[in-house]
Amino acid sequence: MILSGLEIKRNLGGDIIIEPFNEKQLNPNSYNLTLHDELMTYSAPILDMKVENHAQRIKIPAEGLVLESGKLYLGRTAEYTKTDKYVPMLEGRSSVGRLGLFIHATAGFGDVGFAGYWTLQMFCIQPIRIYAGVKICQIFYHVIEGEYERYSSKKYQNNKGIMPSKLYKDFEI
């Protein structure tokens, strides 16, 4: 079961945290999240799963930034979210997708207990100019049934910004 927009609003400050919250971003069964003003791109032409891949930061200027097709950009939401009761999920907005911009390669599925900013894995079909503050994606919440353990990953929990892949840590086990 997916929470309605009104139910998301009723749970704010309790079982759902969205900071900052703007009622104009509330939809019938989701909430629009906005793009922060910073992106990251990986520096190396070939990425390696077993090592930490270095990335460079890019600031999105007021006049926008043109994304190149065939290149991965990591972005993040301007909003911090948290829930200990629901399963958060992220999807791109259809208006954004219709311009050929995808906001997640995978990872649209969150875990109960996730707290932080959402890292977006952005790529485009053709060059597109993007702007900080645009409503880039939407978060929605599923009810979970049965006993569960809260998400407590040391890799991404309580992040403060864009999180490049930490897959290399899986090889340290």
Image: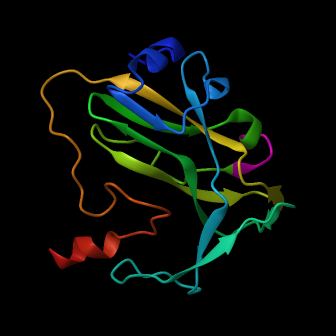
Q: Where is residue 51 in the image (x, y as percent from the top left)?
A: 36, 84
**Residue at left offset 76%, top offset 36%:** 95
Is 160 part of what is drawn in magenta?
Answer: no
Between 3 and 71, the one nearer to me in the picture: 3
Left or right, 127 with reference to 135: right
**Which image quadrant for residue 143?**
top left
Q: Is residue 100 above or below residue 169?
A: above
**Residue at left offset 82%, top offset 60%:** 62
Q: Where is residue 73 in the image (x, y as percent from the top left)?
A: 62, 66
Q: In this view, does 57 lie above or below 129?
A: below
Q: In this view, does 13 lie above or below 35?
A: above
Q: Position of residue 15 (x, y in %)?
A: 32, 26
- Dominant secondary structure of the magenta stretch? loop
Left or right, 47 with reference to 11: right
Left or right, 56 with reference to 112: right
**Which image quadrant for residue 59?**
bottom right
Q: Which region of the structure is painted magenta?
A: 97-101
Between 20 and 1, the one nearer to me in the picture: 20
The image quadrant where one finds the C terminus is: bottom left
Q: Position of residue 81 (x, y in %)?
A: 43, 41
**Residue at left offset 47%, top offset 35%:** 18
Q: Disc count in the image? A: 0
The image quadrant where one finds the N terminus is: top left
Left or right, 136 with reference to 152: right
